[in-house]
Image (cartoon, rainbow, N blue to C red):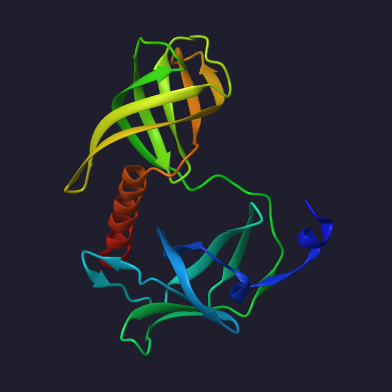
C-alpha cells in the first residue's frame, strides 16, 4: 500500500459506503451500521438508524458514540460530536453525523462478534459427511464454530454451515459458507475452534447481526 495513504489524516467527509457506530451508555453498548447517502464539511448523512420502524434518537447526555469505517481495506475511526435527524428537499430523512476529527488509517480488525451458542452442522471442503458443531459467534464478516475432537481441518479450505436460531422474537435459518482462517484445539474441552471468514455478503447473517444489535440498543435505551 502507498505509504502516503497511511500517513495522511482523513476527515469524516472523505468516507464512502457503509459506516458503523458504537454507542455507549454507562456499562451498556450497542453497534449499528448504516450507509452514507450524502456529505459536507465535517459531516456525513446516512440512512436513518431505526428499530421496529421507529427512527432512533441519540440525544442522551450520557451517550458516547464512536464511528468506524473501512478505507483502502484499512480501518479508520472518529469520535462523534452529534447525530441528528435531518430532512432533505425531497422529503427523505437521514441521520447527520458530525465530527471534526482527522485521523490516520489503522490495521483492519475483525468485525465485532456476537455470541450465540447454537447447535448446527458443518461440512468441510468437498467432504459429503456433515459434522455436528456449536456456532459460538457470528459477525458481518464471519463466524466461529467448535467441533468435538481434533479432526484435520486445513486452513483456507471452504466450510459450509447450516443452523437455525431465534434472536428475540425473530427466527433465522442460516445457510452460509466461508473460508477457514484459523483453528485452535482446546485440550481441556477436547474441541477444535474454527474461525471462518465470509467470502461474500450473506443477507441472512447480516439481518441476524442487525437483530442482535437492535436488542442491545433496546436494552441500552431502557436499562
Residue that sits furthest to the right in the current view: 3
Residue that sits furthest to the left in the current view: 169
The residue shown at (51%, 47%) is 111
Q: Quadrant where the C terminus lies?
A: bottom left
Residue 31 falls in which quadrant of the image?
bottom left
Compare residues 131 and 221 and report the one nearer the observer. 131
Residue 136 falls in which quadrant of the image?
top left
Number of numbered discs overlaid on the protein picture: 0
Answer above or below: position of 94 versus 201: below
Residue 145: percent from left, percent from top: 42, 27
Residue that sits furthest to the bottom in the current view: 89
The answer to whether residue 137 is left or right of residue 18 is left
The residue shown at (65%, 76%) is 101
The answer to whether residue 157 is left or right of residue 85 is right
Residue 40: percent from left, percent from top: 56, 83
The residue shown at (37%, 21%) is 122
Whether residue 60 is visible to the viewer of this picture, yes or no, is no
Residue 158: percent from left, percent from top: 49, 24
Compare residues 163 and 177 and report the one nearer the observer. 177
Answer above or below: position of 201 versus 123: below
Compare residues 45 and 89 and report the one nearer the observer. 89
Residue 153: percent from left, percent from top: 52, 15
Whether residue 151 is visible to the viewer of this picture, yes or no, is yes
Amino acid at each position: 500500500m502507498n505509504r502516503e495513504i497511511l500517513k495522511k489524516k482523513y476527515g469524516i467527509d472523505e468516507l464512502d459506503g457503509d459506516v458503523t457506530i458504537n454507542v455507549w451508555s454507562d456499562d451498556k453498548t450497542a453497534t449499528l451500521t448504516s450507509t452514507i447517502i450524502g456529505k459536507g464539511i465535517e459531516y456525513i448523512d446516512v440512512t436513518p438508524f431505526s428499530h421496529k420502524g421507529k427512527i432512533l434518537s441519540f440525544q442522551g447526555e450520557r451517550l458516547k458514540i464512536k464511528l468506524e469505517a473501512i478505507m483502502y481495506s484499512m480501518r479508520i475511526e472518529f469520535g462523534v460530536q452529534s447525530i441528528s435527524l435531518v430532512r432533505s428537499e425531497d422529503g427523505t430523512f437521514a441521520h447527520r453525523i458530525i465530527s471534526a476529527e482527522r485521523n490516520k488509517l489503522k490495521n483492519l480488525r475483525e468485525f465485532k462478534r456476537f455470541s450465540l451458542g447454537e447447535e448446527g452442522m458443518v461440512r468441510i471442503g468437498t467432504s459429503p459427511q456433515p459434522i455436528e458443531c456449536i456456532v459460538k459467534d457470528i459477525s458481518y464478516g464471519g463466524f466461529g464454530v467448535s467441533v468435538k475432537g481434533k479432526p484435520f481441518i486445513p486452513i483456507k479450505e471452504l466450510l459450509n454451515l447450516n443452523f437455525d436460531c431465534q434472536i428475540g422474537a425473530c427466527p433465522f435459518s442460516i445457510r452460509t459458507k466461508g473460508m477457514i482462517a484459523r483453528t485452535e484445539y482446546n485440550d481441556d474441552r477436547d474441541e477444535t475452534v474454527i474461525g471462518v471468514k465470509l467470502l461474500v455478503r450473506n443477507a441472512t447473517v447480516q439481518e441476524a447481526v442487525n437483530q442482535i444489535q437492535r436488542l442491545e440498543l433496546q436494552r441500552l435505551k431502557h436499562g
